[in-house]
Amino acid sequence: MFDHRYYQYMKCIAECQSFSKAAEKLYISQSFLSHFVKNVEDEFGITIFDRKSIPIRLTEAGTLYLKYTENFCQLENSMRADLSSISTQNHISLNIASIRLLGAYVLPKILPSFVAQHPSIDFQTSEGSIQEIIKLLDSGKTDLILTNLALDSEKYISKRLCDDPIMFAAPYNERMQKMFPNQTTSSEHPLKTDLSFLENETLIILKNGLNMRIAAEAICQHYSLKPKRIIEASGLAAALGLVGGNKGVTFVCRSTIENIRPETPIIYFSCGSMENFTSVFAVFKKTNKNPALQDFLICASKCLSSASSV
């Protein structure tokens, strides 16, 4: 089906009149957003945004592109509504929403097996900030959400699916190489060491309310860590970009590293007894009666258990 990002991303840039502001609002990196737009422009042989204009604005072709993609979104929504109205009583669909990056890490490990076992079940997936996907869950627009922290509420069930350890990521620059020589750490095998040296580092954390900000504050409090300086980043991709630029250290989960795969040398440090502060959770309402939900949870647990043992 039509990827709504082709409309949503362009609309957000047009409204913000800035790639950086749009990226921040969308919780993605500016480089990813710029690359996304450039790919679309190259595919159609057009220029969507006049980058020489201050602020940037849509070109004539860009305005037409936005109009058509909006129509595509509306047409797909209308089609889904019409098809839904004539669906048989036996028709089953499953809607899954995830925090950004986590779905891309988890779902490819689950869906091939689940679709093979349940070919008649339709899927819809979406992603957003934790606040956005909780709204979808509360409104009944999604059956379950994938997140890395359990939700503390009596109306939800948080089922742990697999590990997703949290760790520190630091640039493996000359200074770090002197402190920790000849290290070949990875997200699978982070270095276990005394973390007190991090008090001399700049800590890059996400904005208030985001899961990784909550985790970062909990771990710093647990180890009584007080970094000399704190920088806020709009998302994990931006945070890792700053780490790669020698601007500081940040918290990441294994799922983040598998998705982003930093190009610059990074050294990873274990969070010790706090490494399992984050895990992959499927969260759903206690009142949800969708028969596909439990089938999905059983399949997810098996697939992710097999993947982690490889």
Image (tube, rainbow, N blue to C red):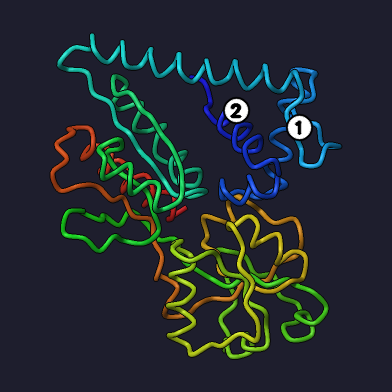
Q: Residue at x 48, y 19 (%)?
A: 1
The amino acid beneath tag 1 is Lys
The amino acid beneath tag 2 is Tyr
Q: How far apart are marks 1 and 2 (CA)?
A: 12 Å
Q: Position of residue 238 (x, y in %)?
A: 65, 57
Q: Position of residue 71 (x, y in %)?
A: 52, 15
User: Where is residue 221, by image quadrant?
Assistant: bottom left
Which residue has dot 2 on it? 6
Q: What element carries label 2?
A: helix
243 to 30, vertically: above or below: below
User: Where is residue 281, by image quadrant?
Assistant: bottom left
Front residue of 141/168: it is 141
250 to 261, vertically: above or below: below
User: Left of 99 or right of it: where is 233?
Assistant: right
Q: Position of residue 196 (x, y in %)?
A: 59, 90
Q: Which residue is drawn at 15% across and 16% down?
A: 89
Residue 51 circle label: none
User: Left of 304 or right of it: where is 34?
Assistant: right
Q: Is mark 1 on a helix, strand or loop?
A: helix
Do the numbered discs 1 and 2 sit on residues whose CB atoms are within 8 Å? Answer: no
Which residue has dot 1 on it? 38
